[in-house]
Every structure is written in structure tokens, then in C-alpha cells.
Amino acid sequence: AALKTYRFDVQVKNVSRLCHSKPIVTVNGMFPGPTVYAREGDTLLVNVTNHAQYNMSIHWHGLKQYRNGWADGPAYITQCPIKTGHSYIYNITITGQRGTLWWHAHISWLRATVYGAIVILPKQGTGFPFPQPYKEANIVLGEWWNNDVEEVVKQGNKLGLPPNMSDAHTINGKPGPLFPCSEKHTYALEVEQGKTYLLRIINAALNDELFFAIAGHNLTVVEIDAVYTKQFTSQAILIAPGQTTNVLVQANQAPGRYFMAARPFMDAPVSVDNKTATGILQYKGIPNNAQPVLPQLPALNNTAFALSFNSKLRSLNTAQFPASVPLKVDRHLFYTIGLGINRCTTCLNGTQLTASLNNITFVMPQIGLLQAHYFNTKGVFTTDFPDRPLTPFNYTGVPLTANLGTKLGTRLSKLAFNSTVELVLQDTNLLTVESHPFHLHGYNFFVVGTGVGNFDPKKDPEKYNLVDPPERNTIGVPTGGWVAIRFRADNPGVWFMHCHLELHTSWGLKTAFVVENGKDSDHSILPPPTDLPPC
Ligand code: C2O
């Protein structure tokens, strides 16, 4: 195991896309930011210095940070922000994880431009559970706004309405030639005929689940969220914000130029898509002016494709990579996901769109929850988050105004150390129809079941996959449907859980778990680092 140091200088830089130039927040002046490379077992010291006029914090999405939430990053959950002119060293030990993850700003909407890949290679001498690819490449999908994103958010909060959505999707920060002035902002991957490539695909978009495909080439899925899967081949993949998917691609077509493309999956009714990002798979020796072929992507609202794609994901579950699914459950949780309307004193028309779990809209605290927990500071949060909705209702029925007003609170759920948890997330379909990618910090979980309509606590568990369910850190809760996840609460700390659509997170679609310490100091939260940013 090695000790690796990285310097992250957060700085504003002018970047031009879609014929506009504007200042954006970057790490080291790069967009997307630098890739962090490591091996399983390594320790990373990332020294983040904030030179920008915004508060900053960086989250290492999918890294478990065992007993060490201090390095997790979500602002006001595990740390206070790194203020302008200040630094913080994230001290991260990578245990038992290898694969593709990513890092991003975890404060306001700054992750719009502050993000990058994390590539964790297997331990020296250990290969992949598939033939070694010839080469590999990162495909980081994102969004581009012509306007200043922080201004867009403020505007939205003032109006109490959704802010403007982005102007383009991007592949490695580039929208591709379907957009004006973007010929030079096109990502190209050069391949050699007959070789196999590993693509590490990351969805860093703020608000869109995406389909991704390459014209004429099948994608073989081998890993999701840094966990190996059973292989399967698909013409396109579906990837939600927060998720990562590794695929193998064989350059086995007639040498030429082929478009790769990413565009949203929205089962909310939408008619147009003018935001498709394209890049190019370019066979070696083919002239740059050859006209590329566009891939067939599933239609914007192809829910059937989405459900079928997700149903093919399975853990590898071999002796070397076992799926340790909890078979016995100590604690059953049932959270309803709702989008609704609340009163708002600072909004222009007195109401605002809001989001909730079990009808509770999460209110961000003023100091970090992990500090409050560790130092036993009273009055910052409560641990009375309900295990199920207080009043049962017809989740997928006609919207009732009674369901729309939500309670506000910084209410967490307390989990006993090493207890096994089953959490069913039920989309309630009350106001808009949308699937929600839920992300849990500090853990991977097993997705033991999913379905459309209302979860049936009697019948649905009989159909659970307890053998080789996919293991991941972010899962799309289907529109008007449910997902059941299981995990063992063996990582003490305070761990955020939220919808990875930034819009919904900012409306309050979030909560956190307090996982208690184990019996001895080896199973307890580590002491905080001395440079932890003060509030
Ligand atoms: Cu990638 Cu809390 O997020």
C-alpha cells in the first residue's frame, strides 16, 4: 500500500462552451477536474486549498471512509466548508474497494463544474475478473449551463420554482459537434481495430439520468459503483447521477468514426431533447473528416428499457468477490419519497416546491452533524426520524393536498452498530413523475428488490434476490415504484443519504443516519483531524 498526495487548488477559470465564455469554479484550472489514481489499500492525502470566493467541500463519492467520516466531505453533514483562503487535507484510506468512483464538490450546486474521476486499481498482482483490456478511458458525463449556476439556483429559490435546466450535456466536459461553436469541444477516443477497451463511465450530471451508447458497438457491463458484476451485453446503458458503470468495448467494426452519445432518460413527460452530448470513437488511421454515424439511443421516456437494463445487474458473487447480503434484518425502514409544495416566507408567491422523506423536509444545520454527534453538542439534530410515514396514504393515487404540506426538521435515524437494515424507498408520485437516484454515504448496499406501484410488505419480499443482488452506492427508485436495499451498519459515523438530483436535494430530499460506535475503540469513530474546517 502506498501513500499518495494530491493538491487540489480550487480556483475560478474562464471556460468557453456553446459560443459563451464564463468563469467557472475548477480544481487546478481543469474542467472536468483531475483524475485521482490509487490502488486498493492505498492512503490518499488530498490537500484542498480554496482560492475561490465560494465556500467549498469535496466528497469522495462511493469511498466508504471506514470510521472516518471526517474525510467524507458533504458540507454541514461531516464538516464545515473550507472557506476562501483556507485548506483542508482529506485523509482517505481505501480498504476493500477497487474500481471506478468519482469526487465532486458537495456544497450548493458547485458540483456542476467541480468533479472528476477516481480510478482505484486492484492490488498489485491481482487482475480484473475479465481479460485485461488493451487500454482504458474515463467517460465523465456532465452538464453545461450558459448562465452562472449559483445564480440560477438563487433565482429558483426566490421564485420557489425549478430553476432553468442546463443547456447541454457533456462528455469529459465537451458537448460535441451537435452544438454551436463546439466542433473543437468534442471528446474523441482513438481505438485500434480488434482491441478491447475498458470505459469507466461516470454520471456527474446534476439533474439527469442518462442513456449512453456508441454507434455500432455493444457495451459489456462488468462493474457498477466500483463492484464487479456478472457480465452482460447491451446496446445502451442507463446511468443515474452518482452512478458509475464500467463497460468493455471491442473495436470490432469496419474502421471508421462512430458517435458515442449521452442523453436524458426522463419518464416525466417531455417532448424535446436538445441537449444530447456526442463524442467520437475514432479508429486509428481514419481521416478526421469522415462523417460519423449516430447511435440508436432509447427514447427519452423509454421506461421499459430502464427497468429491463436495471434488472440485468447482478453481483459477481464468486469466492473471491462474494455478495455478503444480510439475510436476517434487525431494522425495517420504509421511507416515502415525495415532491410537494410548502409555504415559503422568502419566496415571491409565498409557496415553494419542496421534497420530503416520510413527509419530512430536511433542514440543513449550521454546523457539521458529525461534529455535533462526536462532541455531543445538543440542539443540532434529533434522532427521531420515523421508521415509516406517520400517516399512511395511497402513495400512487390522486394527489391530496393533505399530503403536500411537509414538516421541517433535521431529523436523523439512529442505527445500532453492526445491525442489519432493510430500507424500502417508495416513490409517491404526488406531484411530478420522476425517478430518484438515491445515494448513501459511507456504505454500499444490496438492491434486493424493486418494483412498480406500491410496495407490498407481504408479497414483495418473497421475490427478493438474496443471492446475487447488485451492490452499489446509488440506486434509481423507479417512478411510482419502490426499491428495497439492505446493508450492515458497520461503519460508525453520520452518513448522509439523499437524492442525487441536485434540484431535489436542495428541496430537502435528504436525511442522514447516525451509526453508533461498536464496543471498543477499534470499532468507533476516529478522532477528528486537527485541520478540520471550523464553522
Ligand atoms: Cu455524490 Cu452526497 O453525493
Image: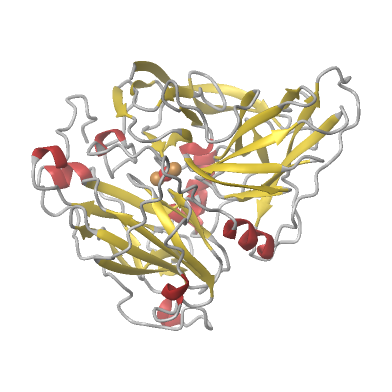
Q: Quadrant of the C terminus?
A: top left
Is 39 drawn above or below residue 439 in the view shown?
above
**Along the line of sight, the residue nearer the viewer: 298 or 496:** 298
Q: Quadrant of the N terminus?
A: top left
Q: State the count of labels.
A: 0
Q: Residue at x 39, y 74 (%)?
A: 405
In the image, ligand 1 is in what quadrant?
A: top left
Residue 118 is situated, as x and y percent measured from the top left of the image, at: 47, 29
**Along the line of sight, the residue nearer the viewer: 444 or 407:** 444
Could you tell whether 271 is left or right of 257 in the image? left
Say whether residue 142 is visible: no
Q: Residue at x 52, y 45 (%)?
A: 243
**Along the line of sight, the residue nearer the viewer: 209 or 130:** 130
Residue 124 is situated, as x and y percent measured from the top left of the image, at: 43, 20
How does the figure colour the protein chain or chains?
secondary structure
Q: Residue at x 59, y 50 (%)?
A: 208
Residue 477 is situated, as x and y percent measured from the top left of the image, at: 50, 62
**Along the line of sight, the residue nearer the viewer: 347 or 534:** 534
Say whether residue 207 is visible: yes
Could you tell whether 225 is left or right of 409 in the image? right
Toward the right, the furthest residue is 290
Could you tell whether 133 is left or right of 429 in the image? right
Q: Quadrant of residue 510?
A: bottom left
Residue 412 is situated, as x and y percent measured from the top left of the image, at: 25, 58
Toward the front, the furthest residue is 319
